[in-house]
Every structure is written in C-alpha cells, then in structure tokens.
C-alpha cells in the first residue's frame, strides 16, 4: 500500500508516493498536472529478495519526516523520505525455538511513533514492532547522518498471543493503545504504556447449523481519533466486524 504526502512547495508535483516491493526497493512515484501519468522518478536501495519490505510506517511529525521499513532479513531502517538517506538501523532478534534453532518469525506489524518525533537529547525515535508469533517490542533507535546497526538500543518486549499467527495490528491516534489480531487470534487491545492487555473480543456466535467460523482477522483499525474504544476489523470470510464500545459487558463484535 503506498504512502502519500501533500507537498506545498512551488515546483513540487501535486502527487508524490512512496512504494515498496518484494526486492526491497523503495520507489518514488510522482504525477505532474491534473491528468499527469504517474512515473517512477527514483529508486532507493539495491534489489535483494532477502531485503523484501514486509512492513512500513511513515511519520510526518513537523520537520521530522521519517520512513521506517522492516525487511525480511530482520533489519529495520529509518529513512529520510525526501532523498532515501539511511538515518537509523536496528536488527530484530528472533526468539529461539525449544531446540535452540531460530524460529522462522518475521515482522508483520510496524509503527513509527509520530507524536514524539525525534527525541532531541538522544537523537532517537520510538518504534513498535510485532512478529508473526506474537512477540511485540517497543524500542528506541538512534538516528544520525552516519547510522550504525543499533542492537543495544533500549527495548521492552512481551507476547500478545500464546498461539496462532498475528496478521494485522494498528495503533490509535494518541499512540497509547494498539490492536492485534490474526489467524486463530481474537482481536485484542493493549495499553502500550503498561504493556498489558485491556480487552479481547469474544468469538462470534455459531450459525443456524451450529457451526463456528474459525477466527481469522486480516485487518484492523481504530474508528475514532478521540475514542480508542471504537474499532473495526476485517476477516478472511470477507466480513466486517465492528465494536463501538469494546469495554461493554458483552465484548462481542458485530459481524456482517
């Protein structure tokens, strides 16, 4: 999905979008004029299947414009969205399995915190990442003109599920709460300040034949900028699930 930004500077194109592909490239697409044909005007990075971009997040916090990309090889980069310059980089450590080998666990959720921007004293930004198997992490990454792989950046980790596969996640406008859901995982909400779960949806009722649809959320987001209790999600069965007050007694979402 492309990320767009409005540009008001004289001479700039009316539309500029950043897109990514399976080879790890970030492409700049511009369209000039009302009927202009979009064209790729810049390409950032070197093509490599192991650098495939799995998730991205964009911050337009005043003068601190940043683009964060999570790659298949476990690297998370912070880029300047104007020229593609690398400003920060860190490695996502995958948890070990019971036999000591690395799990095949990739980033499926990435959020670059916008309300804080770049912390001036430490020159760092905050990121939320989530792996397929539920390992979530809040970390701080230093940013500079000469970035180094920051594996020792401060971080807090926790698990948002004990089984299943995380597919979707979302952070609310205040950046205090996050949603997680996926295959075999009911939609649940977490307080990012406390790293604690504050709500989990109940399974939908069975149909007339007594058959339950397996839990499989593919997308989720917050409906309101002012009220984090209003959420909506999509399922693998092309259904929409919505809850306008997730903390009510039923905790059951409305499907259609």
Image (tube, grey):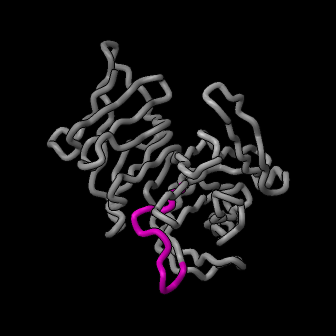
Work out whether residue 10 or residue 209 is closer to the camera in this orientation and state it. 10
Farthest left residue in view: 249
Is residue 3 placed above or below 51 in the rendered structure? above
Answer whether residue 183 is magenta in the image: no
Farthest top residue in view: 208
Residue 178 pos. (x, y %): 38, 54
Which quarter of the figure is the C terminus placed in? top left
In the image, what residue occupies the spot 69% across and 77% down? 145
Residue 115 pos. (x, y %): 39, 64
In the image, what residue occupies the spot 53% across and 49% down? 8
Residue 1 visible within the image:
no
Is residue 91 placed above or below 177 in the rendered structure? below
Work out whether residue 51 or residue 130 is closer to the camera in this orientation and state it. 51
How many labels sit on residues? Answer: 0
- Residue 204 found in image quarter: top left
Residue 147 pos. (x, y %): 70, 77
Q: Is residue 49 left or right of residue 223?
A: right
Work out whether residue 39 or residue 188 is closer to the camera in this orientation and state it. 39
Please give the range of residues in magenta: 110-123
In the image, what residue occupies the spot 73% across and 44% down? 21
Answer whether residue 115 is magenta in the image: yes
Farthest front residue in view: 10
Q: Is residue 207 left or right of residue 169?
A: left
In the image, what residue occupies the spot 51% across and 47% down? 166
Which quarter of the figure is the N terminus placed in? top right
The majority secondary structure of the magenta stretch comes to loop
Residue 50 pos. (x, y %): 80, 54
Farthest bottom residue in view: 121
Q: In this view, does 132 lie to the left or right of 79?
A: left
- Residue 71 found in image quarter: bottom right
């Amino acid at each position: 999905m492309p990320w767009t930004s409005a540009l008001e500077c004289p001479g700039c194109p009316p539309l500029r979008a950043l897109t990514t592909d399976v080879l790890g490239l970030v492409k700049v697409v511009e369209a000039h004029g009302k009927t202009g044909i979009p064209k790729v005007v810049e390409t950032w990075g070197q093509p490599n299947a192991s650098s495939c971009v799995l998730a991205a997040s964009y911050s337009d916090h005043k003068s601190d414009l940043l683009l964060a990309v999570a790659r298949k090889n476990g690297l998370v980069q912070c880029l300047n969205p104007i020229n593609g310059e690398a400003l920060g980089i860190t490695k996502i450590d995958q948890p070990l399995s019971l036999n000591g080998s690395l799990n095949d666990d990739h980033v499926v959720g990435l959020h670059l915190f916008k309300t804080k921007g770049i912390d001036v004293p430490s020159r760092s930004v905050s990121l939320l990442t989530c792996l397929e198997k539920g390992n979530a992490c809040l970390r701080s990454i230093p940013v500079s003109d000469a970035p180094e792989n920051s594996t020792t950046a401060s971080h807090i980790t926790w698990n948002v599920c004990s089984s299943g596969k995380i597919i979707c996640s979302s952070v609310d406008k205040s950046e205090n709460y996050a949603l997680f859901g996926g295959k075999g995982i009911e939609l649940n909400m977490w307080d990012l300040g406390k790293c604690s779960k504050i709500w989990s949806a109940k399974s939908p009722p069975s149909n007339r034949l007594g058959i339950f649809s397996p839990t499989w959320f593919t997308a989720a987001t917050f409906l309101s900028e002012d009220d984090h209790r209003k959420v909506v999600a999509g399922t693998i069965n092309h259904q929409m699930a919505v809850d306008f007050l997730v903390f009510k007694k039923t905790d059951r979402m409305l499907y259609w």
